[in-house]
Image (spheres, coloured by chain):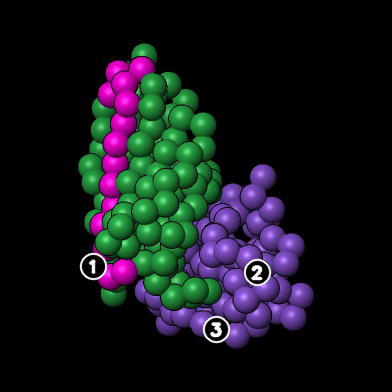
Amino acid sequence: GQQLNQSPQSMFIQEGEDVSMNCTSSSIFNTWLWYKQEPGEGPVLLIALYKAGELTSNGRLTAQFGITRKDSFLNISASIPSDVGIYFCAGTFTTGNQFYFGTGTSLTVIP
Amino acid sequence: DSGVTQTPKHLITATGQRVTLRCSPRSGDLSVYWYQQSLDQGLQFLIQYYNGEERAKGNILERFSAQQFPDLHSELNLSSLELGDSALYFCASSADRTSGGLDTQYFGPGTRLTVL
């Protein structure tokens, strides 16, 4: 099946630092989604991307749809303790069909 | 609140038993997806239904089955339960792009299944 490689697997950062993570696939996607999940909760949609090269922000979060359509990036600026959680990327290459998920990036913010 | 509802929130049962998890998608969403997430693991795609029909199947065991009803709610049936089936089960829904919506997927709060 389709594999999504997400890196890094985990990050430990100081409050106030910026964070970058990325996701790559072996196939071209037409949609990339980024989620945040907190323990015991469902993933919450952060940002959706629909066009190659698209750059979309949601507060301190910015995500980009890679121009090759095989990767996507998420940046968090000026991290705060409530950014703690697991961040997942997801993509689909066929509209209305299965989404494939990355393995997640666990973020810990040290006050 | 994503608009996707799941019941029950918690379920504790014994090995060998059968349980049914229920999901109501967001208003207007035709697709329902089921995922399993074991402790400290990623999301494992189980199955997708679109407007009542099975559309995609992932790593779903033969002991598990699902269906989507005419009112678009979905049920995931897990039978002959084993200890290893203990996990969070999530439902997600997405819009039908042909109606003008864009591909997204919104998750419910999940059902935590514990098999003793």
Quarter of the rendering containing residue A27: bottom left
In space, the residues marked 2 and 1 are separated at their CA atoms by: 28 Å
Quarter of the rendering containing residue A30: bottom left
For the C terminus of chain A, give its image quadrant: top left
The dot on residue B100 is 2
Secondary structure at numbered mark 1:
loop
User: Callout 1, which amino acid?
Assistant: Ser
Residue A9 at what x, y percent from top left? 24, 43
The dot on residue A26 is 1
Residue B29 at what x, y percent from top left? 67, 67
Q: Colour of chain A?
A: green
In space, the residues marked 2 and 3 are separated at their CA atoms by: 22 Å
Parent chain of label 1: A
Residue B34 at what x, y percent from top left? 52, 67
User: Callout 2, which amino acid?
Assistant: Gly
Residue furthest toward the top? A111
Location of residue A65 with respect to B71 vertically, above or below:
above
Secondary structure at numbered mark 2:
loop
User: Callout 3, which amino acid?
Assistant: Glu
Parent chain of label 3: B
Q: Nearer the viewer, mark 2 or mark 3?
A: 2
Q: Is residue A34 visible?
A: yes
The dot on residue B54 is 3
Residue occupying image coordinates x 65% and y 80%: B51
Residue B24 versus residue B19: which sits nearer the camera?
B24
Near mark 3 (Cα within 10 A), the count class, few <14, some 14-19 or many ≥20, is some
**Where are the magenta residues, as a range?**
A13-28
For the N terminus of chain A, give its image quadrant: bottom left
Looking at the image, residue B11 sits to the left or right of residue A83; the answer is: right
Marks 2 & 3, CB-CB < 8 Å contact = no
Residue occupying image coordinates x 26% and y 38%: A10
Residue A32 at what x, y percent from top left? 42, 58
